[in-house]
């Protein structure tokens, strides 16, 4: 795959005129390709509303650490994706967001090949910064991890 081929901006010249909500909804509907990391780590968008996003994921043996359990990076990646997309859904046309820092609290191990959900929401949306939170839980509501994120809102040079 060509580097940058999955960029939403490379697939639609109208993207700079779209709201963040329209862009993330476009990903969910297949209008835009998902980021390669989502396929690599086996997670996908499930629900998108303004300020809130839900991903569904199932960690496989390819996501294990040397001890054979789900690597903390899997938790961090799905949480970061959830929190960032939650913020993006709040952005007006012409604005982008990227994570400056995030924190993850691992509560319990996720069993391999076990479906979980990462649900996130915006806590603060300013002119240049945003804060979001997310959790990973199963279908019965049992929580496996919590995350918080701070990021920067900016206008890209296109």
Image: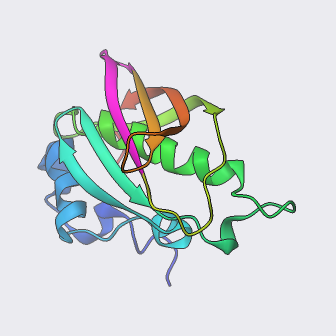
Picture coordinates of residue 25, whole percent (x, y)? 17, 54
In this picture, residue 146 sits left or right of residue 18: right
- Looking at the image, which is closer to me, 78 or 84? 78
Residue at the location (56% across, 50% down)?
77
Q: Which residue lies furthest to the front in this view?
A: 140
- Looking at the image, which is closer to me, 60 or 7? 60
Magenta stretch, overall SS: strand
Picture coordinates of residue 154, whole percent (x, y)? 37, 31
Picture coordinates of residue 20, whole percent (x, y)? 21, 43
Is residue 101 shown above or below 7? Answer: above
In this picture, residue 50 sits left or right of residue 38: left
Q: Give the range drawn in magenta.
A: 117-130
Residue at the location (30% across, 61% down)?
9
Residue at the location (50% across, 42% down)?
80
Q: Quadrant of residue 113?
A: bottom right
Is residue 129 rendered magenta in the image? yes
Is residue 8 rendered magenta in the image? no
In this picture, residue 154 sits left or right of residue 25: right
């Amino acid at each position: 795959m060509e580097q940058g081929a999955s960029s939403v901006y490379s697939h639609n010249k109208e993207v700079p005129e779209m709201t963040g909500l329209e862009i993330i909804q476009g990903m969910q509907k297949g209008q835009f390709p998902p980021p390669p990391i989502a396929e690599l780590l086996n997670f996908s968008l499930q629900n998108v509303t303004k300020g809130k996003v839900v991903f569904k994921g199932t960690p496989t043996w390819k996501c294990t650490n040397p001890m054979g359990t789900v690597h903390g990076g899997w938790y961090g990646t799905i949480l970061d994706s959830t929190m960032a997309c939650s913020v993006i859904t709040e952005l007006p046309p012409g604005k982008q967001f990227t994570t400056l820092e995030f924190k993850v609290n691992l509560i319990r191990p996720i069993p391999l090949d076990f479906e979980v959900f990462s649900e996130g929401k915006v806590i603060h949306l300013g002119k240049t910064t945003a804060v979001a939170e997310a959790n990973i839980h199963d279908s019965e509501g049992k929580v496996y991890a919590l995350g918080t994120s701070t990021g920067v809102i900016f206008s890209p040079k296109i």
